[in-house]
């Protein structure tokens, strides 16, 4: 039997003051960010710290690659995360509007 692999995304959310960063991985970026924004998981880290601004995301052909990248990012420093965000999104705009129109 052939194992089917799906693509994935790594993303970083922040709160409005940019004091808290959250890194996640998903196979469905639209629905996952929507859940964060609506605090579907009320006791979650992102709900507690109001991380609803999508400031970074990257797409991968395989979910395994996305998971590996998430682990790499989480293992890095806060400054490395800030640098990644700033390269992709210099003004730290909320990228939800891009994802929302997919």
Image (cartoon, grey):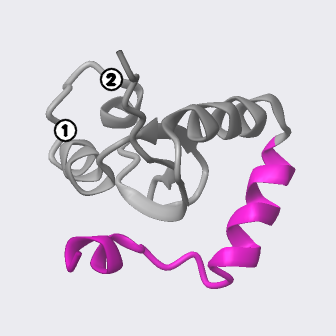
Q: Which residue corresponds to the image point at 35% horizontal and 44% vertical from the top-left?
A: 50
Judge whether 7 appears above or below 18 on screen. Answer: above
How far apart are the alpha carbons under marks 1 and 2?
A: 8 Å
Q: Quadrant of the C terminus?
A: bottom left
Q: Position of residue 27 (x, y in %)?
A: 36, 42
Q: Which residue corresponds to the image point at 27% horizontal and 44% vertical from the top-left?
A: 32
Residue located beneath label 2 in the image:
44
Q: Which residue corresponds to the image point at 39% horizontal and 23% vertical from the top-left?
A: 2
> Which of the pair 91/31 is nearer the observer?
31
Q: Is residue 1 left or right of residue 56?
A: left
Q: Is residue 6 left or right of residue 90?
A: left
Q: Position of residue 72 (x, y in %)?
A: 77, 35
Quadrant in which residue 53 is drawn? bottom left
User: Of helix, strand and loop, which mostly describes the magenta segment?
Assistant: helix
The answer to whether residue 94 is magenta is yes
Q: Position of residue 59 (x, y in %)?
A: 52, 59
Q: Which residues are magenta?
A: 78-102
Residue located beneath label 1 in the image:
39
- Would you say the residues marked 1 and 2 are in contact, meaning their CB atoms lie under 8 Å apart? yes
Judge whether 4 appears above or below 43 on screen. Answer: below
> Which of the pair 9/3 is nearer the observer?
3
Q: Position of residue 38 (x, y in %)?
A: 15, 46
Regarding mark 1 in the picture, which secondary structure is present there? loop
Q: Is residue 47 left or right of residue 23?
A: left
């Amino acid at each position: 039997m052939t194992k089917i692999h799906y693509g994935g995304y790594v993303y970083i959310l922040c709160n409005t003051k940019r004091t808290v960063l959250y890194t996640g991985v998903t196979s469905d970026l639209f629905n996952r960010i929507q859940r964060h924004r609506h605090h579907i998981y009320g006791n979650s880290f992102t709900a507690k710290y109001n991380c609803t601004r999508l400031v970074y995301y990257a797409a991968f052909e395989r979910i395994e690659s996305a998971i590996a990248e998430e682990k790499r990012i989480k293992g890095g420093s806060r400054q490395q995360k800030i640098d990644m965000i700033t390269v992709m999104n210099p003004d730290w705009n909320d990228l939800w509007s891009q994802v929302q129109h997919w």
